[in-house]
Image: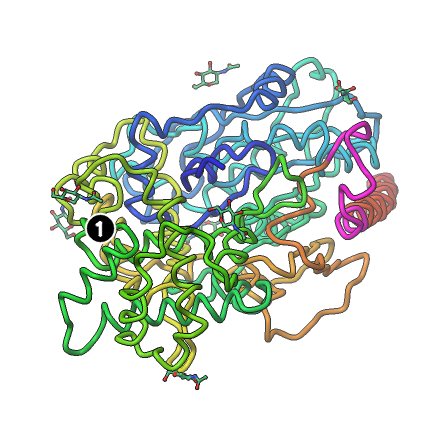
Amino acid sequence: MVRVNYLATLLSLPLAAVALSKTPLTLQELRKQIRPQGAQTLSERQTETTAKYPAFNISVPIDHFHNDTIYEPHSDGFYNMRYWFDAQNYKPGGPVIVLCAGETSGVGRLPFLEKGIVAQLTQATNGIGVILEHRYYGESWPVKDLSTPNMRFLTTDQALADTAYFAQHVKFPGLEHLDLTSATTAYIAYGGSYAGAFVAFLRKLYPETYWGAISSSGVTEAIWDYWKYFEAAAVFAPTGCAETTQKLTNVVDNILLAKKKDTKLVSQVKQAFGLPNVTADADFASSINSGIYSLQGYNWDPEAGSTEFFVYCANVTSDSVLYPATEPLRERVGELIEAGGWGNESKTLTNRMLNYIGYVRGETVATCDNEDQDQCFGTANSAAGGEDFAATDISQTWRSWPYQYCTQWGYIQTGDTPEGVLPLISRTIDLEYGSAICKTAFNLTKPADIDAINKHGGFGISYPRLAIVDGEWDPWRAATPHALGLADRVDTLDEPFKLIAKAVHHWDENGLFPNETTAELPPTAVVEVQKAEAHFVQKWMQEWKLEQARRSIASLS
Ligand SMILES: *[C@@H]1O[C@H](CO)[C@@H](O)[C@H](O)[C@H]1NC(C)=O
Ligand SMILES: *[C@@H]1O[C@H](CO)[C@@H](O)[C@H](O)[C@H]1NC(C)=O
Ligand SMILES: *[C@@H]1O[C@H](CO)[C@@H](O)[C@H](O)[C@H]1NC(C)=O
Ligand SMILES: *[C@@H]1O[C@H](CO)[C@@H](O)[C@H](O)[C@H]1NC(C)=O
Ligand SMILES: *[C@@H]1O[C@H](CO)[C@@H](O)[C@H](O)[C@H]1NC(C)=O
Ligand SMILES: *[C@@H]1O[C@H](CO)[C@@H](O)[C@H](O)[C@H]1NC(C)=O
Ligand SMILES: *[C@@H]1O[C@H](CO)[C@@H](O)[C@H](O)[C@H]1NC(C)=O
């Protein structure tokens, strides 16, 4: 299987458009993307979908908050925010279902209009489906370039205000004769991941404009040091996978982070993994962790995700040697395990480490054909890196999400587990390393202002007609109201609270055409949750009709 680079996963995964991928992207991943060969190509199916749905613009204010000094100098201008819609299921009285596209081009979300959650909800309610692009993504640019000062209008609050403005002002082309604004029509928002948190806040901040919202894998709690990204893998990975990864990571860390660092051992461990020329220890450590990182990319639809996580786990839990080419390393690996403090378990760990090495060599090392491996795997201060991050022209679309997590959201994924808990990625991957891009790209040196997000309710957010839907195995679960350790909530039609068993990241978002379903796909848990969503949105529409009747009676008297 071709190894997808992470920004490509973030932006153009064929169907599910997995968001918040391996966030934050390390400089190394961003660099892979910036290179020409990293350019994304839309899958054929996506191109077909794009052709079916023309894009439209709505003109919205660049600056909704002239009262807030953080946006100085203010702007009185307007910009074009892009959207798509599908009215084939529309009947008078039906709602507008707005899928907020979140931190990626809206194009990646188009499949949901015809066969994912949006199609299902519009069919259930005679609604109009909309994909609404978020400012500073895709083609919705309020500014001419992406210099740090020009990023100032990229806050979640401004984007939420855009989304309210859309509902209050939109005139759908071809349907201009109808008033389909929120004054007369129910608006229901759906979002997955960042957009999931986004629609939860939207419902709470603009309850008069958005009648309901479904927050799927909504990361409503912003967290600066998000070491808990790996909690789901630690708890739910196939037997032995997390334990082996922890022990082998600890072997590496005990060498890289030894009080009396033995440089010979350090080069031996890098050499063993086939990465002898990666200079920075954290860059090396970051280059060997793609396997345990791949849980998020798992989707029930093989076209929309990958099963790489299970392939990796099968590799590191196998007790037979899977890569005969690693056999000559046996003795050296034994020494490294000993030096790394796990000599007492070298009987089982040696073959597993050989398999891990074989996996990394095949999946990661082989993707680099430059003998200066820092060109492929190096980051922050490597001679080759810096200048790419200085570029601020409008084509530098990678800048938007890092800007958002550097300033407001955090989610720096580190190996900073509490003492006594072995991390699944190296402790060399710390806050300083993970947030290096904030300084390099934006000259930002302070932690994100997570209060700007958590003021909306964080883990505790709740609101009438706000549904919270999460995946049991999602690495982002630890930032949602379903985080392990939080009290369970009652699941009601008014405030649905659903955990999809054995599911990962917003598994209710994508769907299949009836002619594509099989006995196994979609899995029952997904079918059930999507049915439940259609059901509670129908219920919300009944309430809407009552409310409309009440309002018209009130206006008569
Ligand atoms: C929407 O706005 C963008 C940017 O201003 C522009 O390039 C594009 O042509 C517009 N699209 C339509 C359909 O008007
Ligand atoms: C600006 O006005 C909005 C309402 O439009 C309000 O919610 C917000 O708190 C105000 N911000 C400041 C900094 O006063
Ligand atoms: C080990 O990983 C490779 C991919 O790197 C895969 O092709 C192979 O099937 C895996 N082996 C097992 C036993 O799962
Ligand atoms: C081996 O050593 C490690 C590290 O000291 C320890 O945590 C682990 O429990 C030991 N394993 C066994 C099987 O005794
Ligand atoms: C590491 O660098 C040396 C010296 O430039 C080069 O000969 C060697 O091929 C490089 N090794 C790898 C695996 O890139
Ligand atoms: C970075 O920020 C510091 C402190 O705010 C400032 O003095 C410096 O000029 C900035 N550098 C760049 C390149 O913008
Ligand atoms: C399956 O159904 C969809 C939607 O009705 C249609 O566009 C597509 O052509 C069908 N595919 C096949 C292989 O019949």
| 522 is within the stretch colored magenta | yes
Which x, y percent locates residue 128?
A: 73, 28
Residues in magenta, as a range: 512-529
Circle 1 Cα neighbour tier, 10 Å, few/some/many (<14 / 14–19 / ≥20): some
What number of labels is visible?
Answer: 1
Label 1 C-beta lies within 8 Å of the nearest ligand 6 atom: no
| 102 is within the stretch colored magenta | no
Query: Which scheme is used to colour this image of the protein?
Result: rainbow
| Residue 557 visible somewhere in the drawing | no
Callout 1: SS: helix
| Residue 366 visible somewhere in the drawing | yes
Rendered view: 264 above or below 365:
below
Which residue is label 1 attached to?
A: 439
Q: Amino acid at mark 1?
A: Lys
Rendered view: 41 above or below 232:
above
Q: Nearer the viewer, residue 46 or 247?
A: 247
Q: Residue at x 78, y 57 (%)?
A: 494
Query: Which quarter of the rendering shows the C terminus?
Result: top right
Q: Nearer the viewer, residue 520 or 125?
A: 520
Q: Residue at x 61, y 64 (%)?
A: 481
Which x, y percent locates residue 300?
A: 67, 45
Q: Nearer the viewer, residue 77 or 229?
A: 229
Which x, y percent locates residue 509?
A: 67, 42
Asked if residue 177 lies left or right of residue 262, the reply is right
Q: Nearer the viewer, residue 400 or 548?
A: 400
Which x, y percent locates residue 443?
A: 20, 48
Q: Residue at x 61, y 31 (%)?
A: 131
